[in-house]
Image (tube, rainbow, N blue to C red):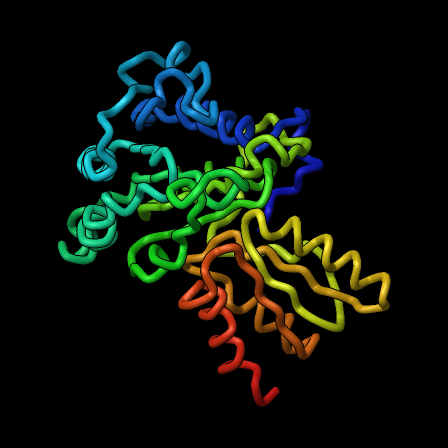
Amino acid sequence: PDPDYTSLGSTTKLNLFQSINSALHTSLSTDPTAILFGEDVAFGGVFRTSQNLRDEFGQHRVFNTPLSENGIAGMAIGYASMGGTAIGEIQFADYIFPAIDQIVNEMAKFRYRSGNQWSCGGVTLRAPCGAVGHGGLYHSQSPEAYLCHTPGLVVVMPRGPRCSKGLLLSSIRCKDPVIFLEPKILYRSAVEEVPDADYEIPLGKAEIMQQGTDVTIVGWGAQLRRLQLACDLAAKEGISCELIDLRTLLPWDSETIIRSVKKTGKLIVSHEAPITCGFGAEVAATLQQECFFH
């Protein structure tokens, strides 16, 4: 279950990049094998998510890499296969594609191809994703559907600061390789009270943000902010919406969505990524299969 936030003690008002920084600090503090690396990570990263971490933990644990996403992924696999915790950053999710061979053919299959003799489950690759309005064609993409097509990976996308800290800590400690996609438009615009404590949010479990009876609304990442506004507008028209954040896209929590749709009888899925073969199609197809005759 999700943590009881009221029992976690003191909180601090943080935006998304600060909550990511807090999770990274916690991981480096509690796991002596954890290392953090990527392009420009040592000075804090282009979005400041690794700010001050090199000063505290040293350049042997927080360091820059060459401009090679394939190399970042490959190094993460190698380090994790020796038992370490590798936290790699792909500076923009748009540039994860040069690393796709390492991710799809090595990282995702490492345990399976060895008959469970080897593992690189200590890998977490973080990547800022989505549009900000001025990123152009190379700094605006949402590649989650490509990644979710790959058995052996866990794919996560948080919607805000509080859940991002708990989800990232769970991802880093997960025994399967995780791709952690961070909606960059939220880095400074999303602000919440975030517990100072070390806490985890379970992977593979959706969150019902708002109970409703008339229609089920499903989304993930930054799209939840728009969906919440839509639900508020619908409420003024007397429409009761059940709003659900998937949080983990692979494996995704189909059971929670199925239960909700069997209650409401209707489903709307909304995401920022391209519609054709987008992950929303997977959700819609599964719910059609499971709920059509209900």
Q: Residue at x 42, y 42 (%)?
A: 171
**Quarter of the figure with the C terminus:** bottom right
Residue at 67%, 28% in the rendered image: 9
- Point out residue 229 in the picture as x, y percentages from the top left corner: 73, 53
Q: Residue furthest top?
A: 55
Dividing the picture into quarters, in which one does residue 50 lie? top left
Q: Is residue 26 visible?
A: no
Which of these two is toward me, 105 or 97?
Answer: 97
Identify the residue shown where x is 33% and y is 19%: 62
Front residue of this view, candidates 100 and 130: 130
Report the residue at 71% width, 36% height from top.
6
Q: Is residue 224 left or right of residue 157?
A: right
Q: Which residue is most to the bottom? A: 293
253 is higher (above) or lower (below) than 79: below
39 in relation to 294, above or below: above
Asked if residue 109 shows in the view, the reply is yes
Q: How many dots with numbers? A: 0
Q: Nearer the viewer, residue 34 or 98?
A: 98
Q: Percent position (x, y) of residue 232?
A: 78, 56
Asked if 228 appears above or below 86 in the picture, the reply is below
> Picture quarter containing residue 18?
top right
Q: Position of residue 167 (x, y in %)?
A: 50, 42
Relative horizontal placement of residue 36, taking residue 15 as reference (left or right) = left
